[in-house]
Image: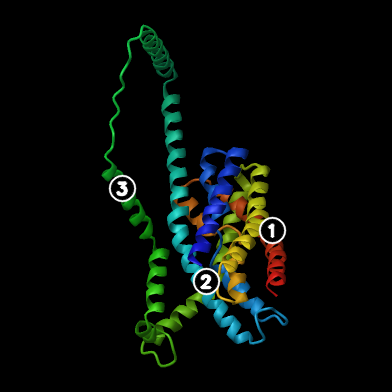
Amino acid sequence: MPINVGLTFIIGGALGWIAVKLLKPGLHLEGLVIASCSAANLGNLVLIVVPAICHEDGSPFGDDHAACSSIGLSYASFSMALGGFYIWTYTFHLIRSSSVKFKALKAAEQEASRDPNKDLEANAKTHLLDEEIQGYDAENHPVSHEKKSVPIWRKIVELLRQIVEELMAPPTIAAVIGLIFGSITWLKGLIIGDNAPLRVIQDCINLLGNGLLPCIILILGGNLIQGLRSAKIKTTMILGILFVKYLLLPIIGIGVVKAADSFGFLPPDPLYHFVLMLQFTLPPAMSIGTMAQLFDVGQEECSVIFLWTYVFAALALTFWSTVFMWILS
């Protein structure tokens, strides 16, 4: 599953990059479009869809609805933990870098618009300097430009610093703590189970979790209102994201899971195969909206993208879930 989730981000990001190059949105929307194509809602919707399908009669996942729902819930929880890790590293970096580029461009434009006479004078001097350099080169006198090279070790340290900074996001820390407690038996026994000494922690987390999904849906609806009034995004951009999310990625997901199964990498559990395929079919992660607000870039456009992707998600998830169960039955 970690590899499968990583493939959804890599393949979706590559397709989103192609869509950006073809459709050419604004600079501030490039990271948002790639993130919308790559980062899927790997937690909330999986928690809803998988247990619901387990309770349907005639599903290919067995007649024991309680066991199916319990196992499906564990798959969905692991999917949510992995999704948080990838979203708050890969997607977080995408949105932040897009914001930095856009704000740098705006700052340069504002600086140039403050005194147009000085800007014209600077451009004229630059043009004359370029002509002199070209003439100097034409006389077979090479011009040397000294560039300050940054040591490779400093680049590696900077990259590691960025990775550690992104990994310190609260969702990532919570996922790591949850995986540690879930994988170590004696730690899990402290919290989970009827006889666990700290069972009150599990009860409190269950109460908070029951209100999680309704609150997230309310927040999503509140964010949509803002975008519908002032967003400026091309219709072709919306269609491109829908094409990638609900046509290309599900087809690729079927191929990826079937290939992994043919090589013997997957256990013979149709429910597990279904979850892996479903991860390629989900709408964009709602955390993208939080990042857009955090970095103040593309908030309105993000709301419009969410509106149309979640509207079509109802149809796409129904259709592709039927296809997946037909393939696995």
Of the residues tagged 1 and 2, which is closer to the observer?
A: 1
Q: Position of residue 268 (x, y in %)?
A: 59, 76
User: Label 1 crowding class (10 Å Cα cut-off): few <14, some 14-19, many 20+?
Assistant: some
* First in sequence: mark 1 vs mark 3: 3
Which residue is drawn at the image coordinates 64% and 52% (left, top)? 244
* First in sequence: mark 1 vs mark 2: 2
Towards the viewer: 258 or 76: 258
Give SS at disc 3.
helix
- What amino acid type is highlighted by mark number 2? Leu
Q: Are marks 2 and 3 in contact (CB under 8 Å)?
A: no
Give the alpha-carbon distance from disc 1 to disc 2, as whole Å.
23 Å
Residue 153: image quadrant is: top left
Give the alpha-carbon distance from disc 1 to disc 3, as whole Å.
42 Å
The disc placed on residue 312 is 1
**What residue occupies the far front of the structure in this picture?**
263
Task: Say which residue label 3 marks.
Answer: 156
Task: Say which residue label 2 marks.
Answer: 212
Rendered image coloring scheme: rainbow
Residue 54: image quadrant is: bottom right
Q: Position of residue 317 (x, y in %)?
A: 67, 65
Residue 196: image quadrant is: bottom left
